[in-house]
């Protein structure tokens, strides 16, 4: 294949952290450790499942919840593409990423205010603001720091799941103890009685906001030297980029295997997004009076599942090696089917937990196998174009299918949606199986 990617005029923005390899775990590395801790705490206290439940309790309909969550993905993907292009021209510095983290933290304060005011509009706006800020904060932070600078806090990242799990459990406990209606509290100072209401979500989101604000603030002070290798016109580069994606789209889409990966991957992503919009709500409402009750049930179900997902990558690599990547994709998708199916078929807290575990493990298996197959099919110099095409295709699919699925949920309820999601995942598995047999 003689085609050369002419638009690649420079490498990604390079970052050189001075003295990290000499100073050991002190100095900058200590700052990175502190940043990682605050991130893990923030993601635990600000769990997306909790946010969806509170959105529902604020008064949002199933339709609105589905639409807003879909819009968050579309907006986040678009911002990712635009900032990626911008970073090619002018770079994305630590201060910009730090400010994004601070903005992400403030979005949780807005969510707390929205719940207190029972404002669905403000809640939706806060969620969209968070989706805009989390992209540069998450994705480009990883690009700003070289691999060698992660040596000193890699162990902490490995244990980060424990920090997030503990934070998630504490947040659930607080929100159950102090429900959305508030708990009357009073104390006496110098003989005067002070009374007020405590709201668990305000406590949880204040911790979340403070964690991300501090994390972003710390990042802005880390000694990182940024080297921008290219200067130019952003809009001209963006126009050329989209033109090249358009030109190469026909090549990628003519490849049957790549086409199946794009279609199946987009459909799987949509199923996960719409499912995750309602899984937590279902567990909270259906099992509020059993088990641990309320938010703690949600926390326990998803904590067990997340820890189980560690097995996913191991299973995927072993299966891909011995059985091939398409059989692994079929196997992983089959596991994913069990999640919505367990929520539909005679649900109990135990069956839902087991189904969630299988679904999360299956998603991990599919993710690793899909990545390995992509690396095998797409040449390195064309992968960026491929992933950009995939993002654009996925955005279009979201814009079409998410409103339909959200409206379906509004009309027929959660159980019917879960059955539909299971059937769609079966369809994805059949796509993979058909290609496997053809090959």
Image (cartoon, rainbow, N blue to C red):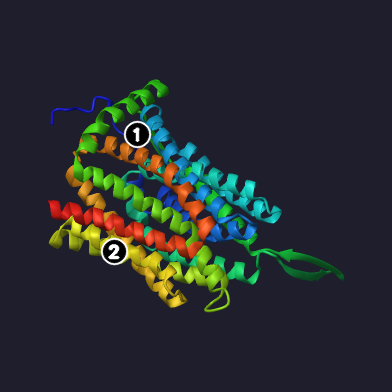
Q: Residue at x 52, y 61 (%)?
A: 413
Q: Residue at x 56, y 49 (%)?
A: 105
In this rendering, the answer to whether 243 lies above or below 76 is above
Q: Element at badge 2?
A: helix
**Which label was assigned to residue 128?**
none
Mark 1 lies on residue: 13
Q: CA distance from mark 2 to mark 1?
A: 40 Å
In this rendering, the answer to whether 280 lies above or below 380 is below
Along the viewing direction, whichever of 18 and 387 lies nearer the viewer: 387
Q: Position of residue 185 (x, y in %)?
A: 75, 70
Crowding at mark 1 (Cα within 10 Å: few <14, some 14-19, many 20+):
many
Q: Position of residue 361 (x, y in %)?
A: 32, 64
Quadrant assignment, res 58:
bottom right
Q: Residue at x 47, y 65 (%)?
A: 415
Which residue sits furthest front? 411
Along the viewing direction, whichever of 357 and 40 lies nearer the viewer: 357
Q: Position of residue 439 (x, y in %)?
A: 12, 51
């Amino acid at each position: 294949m003689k085609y050369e990617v002419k638009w690649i005029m420079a490498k990604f923005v390079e970052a050189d952290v001075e003295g990290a390899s000499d100073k050991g775990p002190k100095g900058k590395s200590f700052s990175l450790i502190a940043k990682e801790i605050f991130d893990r705490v923030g993601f635990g206290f600000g769990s997306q499942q909790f946010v969806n439940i509170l959105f529902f309790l604020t008064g949002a309909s199933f339709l609105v919840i589905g639409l807003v969550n879909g819009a968050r993905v579309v907006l986040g993907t678009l911002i990712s593409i635009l900032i990626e292009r911008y970073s090619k021209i002018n770079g994305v510095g630590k201060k910009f990423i730090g400010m994004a983290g601070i903005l992400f933290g403030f979005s949780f304060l807005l969510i707390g205010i929205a719940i207190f005011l029972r404002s669905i509009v403000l809640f939706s706006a806060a969620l969209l603001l968070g989706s805009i800020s989390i992209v540069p904060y998450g994705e480009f932070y990883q690009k700003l720091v070289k691999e060698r600078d992660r040596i000193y806090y890699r162990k902490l990242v490995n244990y980060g799941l424990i920090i997030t799990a503990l934070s998630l459990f504490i947040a659930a406990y607080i929100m159950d103890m102090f429900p959305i209606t508030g708990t009357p509290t009073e104390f006496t100072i110098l003989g005067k009685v002070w009374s007020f209401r405590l709201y668990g979500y305000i406590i949880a989101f204040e911790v979340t906001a403070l964690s991300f604000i501090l994390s972003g603030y710390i990042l802005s002070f880390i000694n990182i030297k940024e080297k921008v290798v290219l200067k130019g016109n952003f809009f001209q580069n963006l126009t050329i980029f989209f033109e090249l994606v358009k030109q190469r789209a026909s090549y990628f889409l003519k490849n049957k295997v790549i086409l199946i990966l794009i279609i199946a991957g987009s459909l799987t992503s949509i199923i996960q997004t719409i499912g995750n919009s309602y899984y937590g709500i279902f567990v909270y409402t259906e099992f509020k009076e059993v088990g641990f009750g309320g938010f703690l049930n949600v926390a326990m179900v998803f904590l067990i599942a997340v820890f189980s997902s560690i097995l996913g990558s191991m299973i995927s690599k072993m299966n891909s090696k011995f059985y091939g990547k398409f059989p692994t994709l079929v196997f992983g998708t089959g596991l994913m089917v069990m999640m919505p199916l367990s929520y539909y078929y005679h649900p109990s807290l135990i069956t839902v937990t087991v189904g969630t575990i299988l679904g999360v493990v299956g998603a991990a298996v599919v993710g690793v196998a899909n990545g390995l197959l992509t690396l095998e099919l797409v040449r390195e110099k064309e992968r960026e174009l491929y992933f950009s095409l995939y993002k654009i295709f996925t955005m279009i699919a979201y814009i079409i299918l998410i409103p339909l699925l959200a409206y379906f949920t509004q009309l027929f309820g959660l159980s019917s949606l879960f059955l539909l999601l299971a059937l769609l995942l079966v369809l994805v598995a059949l796509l993979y199986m058909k290609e496997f047999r053809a090959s």
